[in-house]
Amino acid sequence: MGTDIFLLNISGQDKPGLTSSLTSVLAEYGAKILDIGQANIHDTLSLGIMFEIKSGKKSAAVLKDLLFKAYELGIKAKFKPISLENYENWVSLQGKDRYIVTILGEKLAAEQISEVTKIISDKNLNIDSIKRLTGRLSLVKEEEYPRASIQLSIRGKIEDKTIFTAKFMQISRELDVDIAFQEDNIFRRNRRLVCFDMDSTLIQTEVIDELAELAGVGIEVRAITESAMNGEIDFNESFKQRMKLLKGLSEDVLHNVALNLPITKGARRLIDTLHTYGFKTAILSGGFTYFGHYLQEKLGIDYVYANQLEIKDGVLTGNYLGDIVDGNKKAEYLQALADKEGIDISQTIAVGDGANDLQMLNLAGLGIAFHAKPTVKANAQSSISSIGLDGILYLLGYHDRHIDLFD
């Protein structure tokens, strides 16, 4: 005697013991569970169970008993017979490439989700699951820090990932939403090191510009900084020019600036969560160790690599000590830290906003352009522009209940 395959779909008001009651009926008839999945939205349950059972009397009886049990529980039950050919075709899909698409924003509108999923559909990719990663939003109470994120797990063959991600970037620009696209592989699930640029990433200022204002050379230094961040002039040369303009600035000024550094929204939440789950963190900055070490102590950062100011008799000389930390150096430090921690480079994350961050962003397993310049966003793997630094946690697949567990 052969076997029958059925897909049981359950919908209705969720209640304790529902899954147990249904699977108990299946157990009585010796059914084999081939797949099972459940979703719950506003206490409304959607449950699917695919099962195999011997053909004949058992097959008819189990359907009858499941319908009766569903009636007792006050839920709706539907059955769909599955042919062996269709089942085997479905099984064969499990070897297909898998990807994760994360959508981020202060709030998510239907249009944004529609446009993202249309691209996925146009490429004949399947959406296996959709998860909300952020907590529920109140419609009455105003959120101090609104944020919304959903994660789509997709499966299929992508011939040209560059074209695929370019379309996501276009939607991102037009609809003011962040869309991250990643391969769903073992490295994504096992990231271990996160490296941050400092100025305009971990803090919401360019420290060298603040120092220049206090030294009376703000206009000149800001112009050089902007050109360097946009990749219009060589970073090393711009650094030397700006350093000379700071000559004679008192060390006391540096101390006062450090005490008032504006830490980026979501930074503490991000770093505390990363450390809770065993990540190492680092600052890789074209800024200064003086401020990097201050943030290291304040936030609990593990490593700091930045430029060291030369200070004599309590004032800046206009010179620096050691090598300039430019884009090449940042990438070198990223690789060196991965080696030191004994991890593959694919297990690293790099976060930055300027042109001198692109090399480390492209070297890391996941490179994130954070509130970045247009040229940087256009050349980075992923970007976040709509919410704070803790948006990175959603790219890693964390739900708010995992993030706020230790608050």
Image (cartoon, helix red, strand yellow):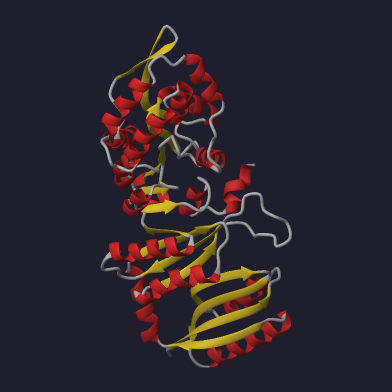
**Residue drawn 62% across and 50% down?**
145
Horizontal relation, residue 265 to residue 199: left or right: right
Foreground residue, 70 or 259? 259
State the image coordinates of residue 97 (x, y, percent, origin top left): 33, 65
Q: Quadrant of residue 211?
A: top left
The answer to whether residue 59 is above or below residue 232 is below
Q: Quadrant of residue 60?
A: bottom right
Pick the front one: 254 or 99: 254
Please identify the quadrant where the N terminus is shown.
bottom left
Q: Nearer the viewer, residue 8 or 124?
A: 124
Residue 121 vs 285, above or below: the answer is below
Q: Residue at x 47, y 28 (%)?
A: 210
Q: Which residue: 47% across, 52% down?
A: 385
Q: Quadrant of the C terminus?
A: top right
Does residue 302 appear in the picture of this structure? no
Instruction: Give me the residue at 27% from left, 30% from top.
Output: 236
Residue 246 visible at all? yes
